[in-house]
Image (cartoon, grey):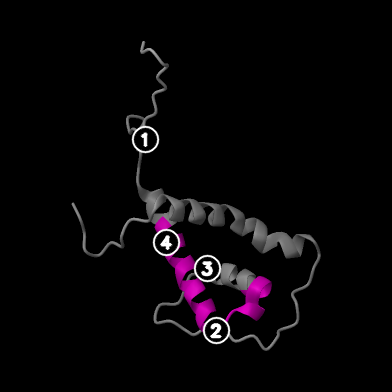
Amino acid sequence: MSDSNLSPSPSRRGFAKSLALAAAAPALAGAGIALGQTAPAPTSAPTPIPTPEAPSSVAEALTEVVRIRWGKHLTGEQLGEIAKTLDGRLKGAEAMKKVKLTNADEPDVVFFAELPGGR
């Protein structure tokens, strides 16, 4: 049941990172506004290199947060890669949301605690 159009399955660690990033995105995006801070003056930091498929607006906003926080250490090419990676992870999260689970679906790993000496 493999499809050549699908990207490889993300690892659990990658999924956890994207989940944490998606959960923190609204807080990070609104943190400056909520605190009454203004955006820093534009610096001479290079802008990301445009890609054939433009990242989503959420990925662009998160990339802007990265540029504001760590922009002086990153090149435009690196920011472009970050934008593409964020966009890919956000698309993966959206694809996971589309999978319908029922009450009968089991978790991947089922843990049974066994005491020494058996039952």
Which structural element holds mark 3? helix
Which structural element holds mark 4? helix
Q: Which residues are magenta?
A: 67-92
Measured along the vertical axis of the image, is residue 22 above or below residue 88? above
C-alpha separation, residue under disc 3 versus residue under disc 1: 30 Å
Q: Quadrant of the C terminus?
A: top left
Quarter of image, res 67: bottom right
Nearest to N terminus: mark 3 or mark 1: 3
Q: Residue furthest front?
A: 117
Most prominent secondary structure in the magenta stretch? helix
Quarter of image, res 31: bottom right
Measured along the vertical axis of the image, is residue 107 above or below residue 33? above
Q: Which residue is mark 1?
A: 107
Q: Which residue is mark 3?
A: 59
Disc 2 crowd rating (10 Å Cα; few below 14, some 14-19, many 20+) is some
In the rendered image, residue 36 lying in the magenta stretch gets the answer: no
| Residue ID at (42%, 16%) | 115
The amino acid at mark 3 is Ala
In the rendered image, residue 70 lying in the magenta stretch gets the answer: yes
